[in-house]
Image (cartoon, helix red, strand yellow):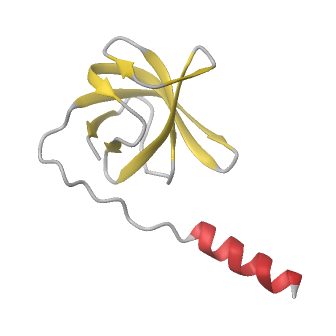
Amino acid sequence: MGVNFLRIFRRKREETPEVEIVSRRPVGRFKVEKILRVLKRQVLIGEVLEGLIYPGYKVKGRKAGLIMEIERNHQKVNFAVAGDRVALMLENEIPCEKGETLEVYQS
């Protein structure tokens, strides 16, 4: 019984739904400097080029991802502004590369 439960849990964790962008205009831009994996989550480290970023906003390159958490200097913060170098922990993984500029949209 316990093994079947774990299979169901793992399967649901891997099947993440596609994130949709509802907003038409981006509210900011983020330049990716480094891509990490922490606790099975994708973390993008980089600089906010313009705008204001909050958790719950979405980043979009070739695909879109939901921002779960923002960290600056190893401290969790409520937002990031232009010029900040931050780490964005995403709910789902998106394909991106070092040096790529992503658009940020409101949720």
Going 66% across and 51% down the picture, which residue do you hit?
Answer: 40
Going 50% across and 52% down the picture, which residue do you hit?
Answer: 93
Vertical position of residue 58 compared to residue 98: above or below: below
Left or right of 87 in this view: 94: left
- From the top left corner, tell me how far across and down residue 79 is, in percent: 41, 24
Going 87% across and 81% down the picture, which residue do you hit?
Answer: 2
- From the top left corner, tell me how far across and down residue 54 is, in percent: 38, 32
Vertical position of residue 77 compared to residue 17: above or below: above
Q: Closer to the camera, 18 or 1?
A: 1
Left or right of 57 in this view: 95: right
Q: Quadrant of residue 76?
A: top right
Quarter in which the N terminus is drawn: bottom right
Q: Quadrant of residue 55?
A: top left
Residue at the outermost left position: 24
- From the top left corner, tell me how far across and down residue 17 is, in percent: 43, 68
Going 51% across and 50% down the picture, which residue do you hit?
Answer: 91
Q: Closer to the camera, 100 or 6?
A: 6
Tally of numbered tags: 0
Residue at the outermost right position: 2
- From the top left corner, tell me how far across and down residue 78 is, in percent: 46, 25
